[in-house]
Amino acid sequence: MVFAMAQIMVFWVLGESLHYLTDIPISGSVLGMLMLFFYLMIRQNISLDLEKTSQALISQLTLLLLPGGVGLFFLGERMQGQWLPLLISIFVGSILSIILSLLLMKQLVKRKGL
Amino acid sequence: MDWLLALNDTLIGLILHLADSPLLPVAMTLVAFQIGIWLFNRLKHPAWLPPIVSSGLILVGLILLMPIDYNQYFQGARWISFLLGPATVALAIPLFLQFHHIRQLFMPITITLFIGAPLAAGLSLAIAWMLGADLTVILSLAPKSVTAPIAVSLAEILGGIGGLAVGIVAITGVIGSVFTPIISRWLKCEDERVIGFIMGMNGHGIATARAFEISPKTGAFSSLAMGLTGIFTAILLPLCYGLMS
């Protein structure tokens, strides 16, 4: 647990350092994830400890998002008149995107005869 | 009546003292979340009341009742949000474990990702822009199909609102998990790999949890799509935004 957590934190520090030093507009944690992914691809091997720790972290994502998510209810006048266009665009955009990407992938798989 | 006023003052003082450190904010977040999970199980897993909604509403109620505001609450509760960092880094592990599935359908997956992921963000952005939404709202909407921890950092990098992005991502996830199976039946698509991939690409973690209920294969492809879409969007979106502004 501690070893896996240390590994994860080291990759986060590396990602954050890269973000700070190069001005790449990608957050440090995402860069850390990319670096850890490439590290694992090169090693082609993962410890059970790291697998279990990542599962534990990811399974509690909802809790970790809760403090920020509550902020949604305290946006006040910044959101005046914004809710309706927002909800319409989420709903219509998502449905259209599902239909189009499904048709695309279905055709691609069919053409390849996979 | 004097003793009642004195009691009230003492109570307010106590709450302010407890909220001055992370103690009260962290404790109330954990308790509210536990009640949310308990409600979710008690009501037999209703899709309309996921734990994040019920526990979020409980927290809103508590913050309004107490003599503290949201900023004071968040100052302490940041102790919990901090763990979003390692949780994001840890997303590399499921992606690594599911990555071998990509070999089965390499070209269809690559082309669908390169066209579909910008589509998932772009269509909603275009509609919001046409309906006259504000720029901060549009920027919070941009990462809507991406798994929430990545979406929060993306929204903040772009200049959107993290909290709003969490809400938008949650709604998108519910739509992706409910409507992808219906639409695939309607379009006569029975390939579990395709259904899974489209679920993960449009509905991230929420749809992936649903995809694993359909079948392990659907879940594996959904999980793969969630990781690929997250990385692809996290790289592409800030670059596009940088070029446009």
Image (spheres, grey):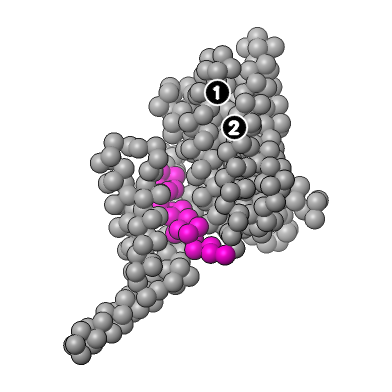
Q: Residue at x 19, y 87 (%)?
A: B1
SS for dot 2: helix
Residue under mark 1: which chain is it in? Answer: B
Q: CA distance from mark 2 to mark 1?
A: 9 Å
Q: Indicate the amino acid at tag 1.
A: Ile
Q: Is residue B199 above or below residue B105?
A: below
One can see residue A35 in this view: no
Residue A61, magenta (yes or no): yes
Residue placed under numbered mark 1 in the picture: B183
Q: Indicate the amino acid at tag 2.
A: Ile
- What range is drawn magenta here? A56-77
User: Who is closer to the viewer here, B232 or B65?
Assistant: B65
Q: Residue furthest bottom?
A: B2
Q: Are marks 2 and 1 in contact (CB under 8 Å)?
A: yes
Where is residue B170 shown, x and y percent of the image? 50, 44
Q: Is residue A104 above or below residue B139?
A: above
Residue A62, magenta (yes or no): yes
* Left or right of A48, for residue B163: right
Residue under mark 2: which chain is it in? Answer: A
Q: Residue at x 30, y 58 (%)?
A: B31
Where is residue B176 shown, x and y percent of the image? 53, 33
- The numbered disc on residue A95 is 2
